[in-house]
Image (cartoon, rainbow, N blue to C red):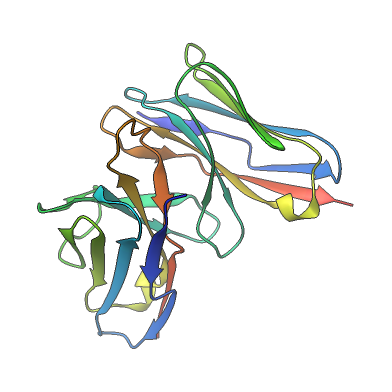
Amino acid sequence: GAVVSQHPSRVICKSGTSVKIECRSLDFQATTMFWYRQFPKKSLMLMATSNEGSKATYEQGVEKDKFLINHASLTLSTLTVTSAHPEDSSFYICSARAIAAGDTGELFFGEGSRLTVL
Amino acid sequence: GQNIDQPTEMTATEGAIVQINCTYQTSGFNGLFWYQQHAGEAPTFLSYNVLDGLEEKGRFSSFLSRSKGYSYLLLKELQMKDSASYLCAVMDSNYQLIWGAGTKLIIKP
């Protein structure tokens, strides 16, 4: 099946620094990538929808200046958590929707990135 | 509003069968997904239903009734490794995924 690679899988940073997380579709092109955040014992929360070549669409309550999303190519989207604080510590997951004939709308998920802000 | 309902937790015995239900109310419908998630890991795709009926894939089957806004995930011959959270998600008319809170499945020997 299609593979989505997310990097880094774990990152620990100091408060006030910025962290970039990459999401790559390895064997398919993705016009749309989604970024999720998971809070402990809760389901995934959609943060934003990223479309290649255009600005991301953020969900209500998500600070776009804090969570910068770039989707520069059909195989790469990045999420940058700027000026990270301990409350930003979480599991961040990306998913990609493939462009393909007969596209079922299936999403393929990255492995997730666990961010810990000290 | 949009919402997905599924039980919070279920317990089953190794080797048995368990059915996890999911009901939904969404703005439009472009398919229903079931994902398995082990603690600390990203969800893994199990099934996708867009037409009514049963889709079978090995030990796992998924059923959809669009008129009832209802789906279930059926797991047969349960194994200890099936202990995980099972997430139901519906893609709405804008191709946004609406997620349920997940059902924690506990398998006992």
Reply above or below: B29 against B90.
Answer: above
Residue B57, by quadrant, is top right
Residue occupying the far right of the picture = B109
Q: Residue at x 22, y 75 (%)?
A: A82
Asked if residue B12 lies left or right of residue A42, the reply is: right
Residue occupying the far bottom of the picture = A14
Relative depth, front residue between A89 and B79: B79
Relative depth, front residue between A5 and B20: A5
Q: Residue at x 27, y 75 (%)?
A: A20
| Residue B92 place in picture, x, y as percent | 33, 30
Location of the N terminus of chain B by quadrant is top left
Q: Residue at x 31, y 78 (%)?
A: A85
Reply above or below: A11 against B4.
Answer: below
Residue A68, by quadrant, is bottom left
Reply above or below: A31 against B58.
Answer: below
| Residue A66 place in picture, x, y as percent | 20, 68
Asked if residue B64 lies left or right of residue A27, the reply is: right
| Residue B17 place in picture, x, y as percent | 80, 34
Asked if residue B56 lies left or right of residue A46, the reply is: right
Q: Residue at x 47, y 49 (%)?
A: A1
| Residue A116 place in picture, x, y as percent | 42, 78
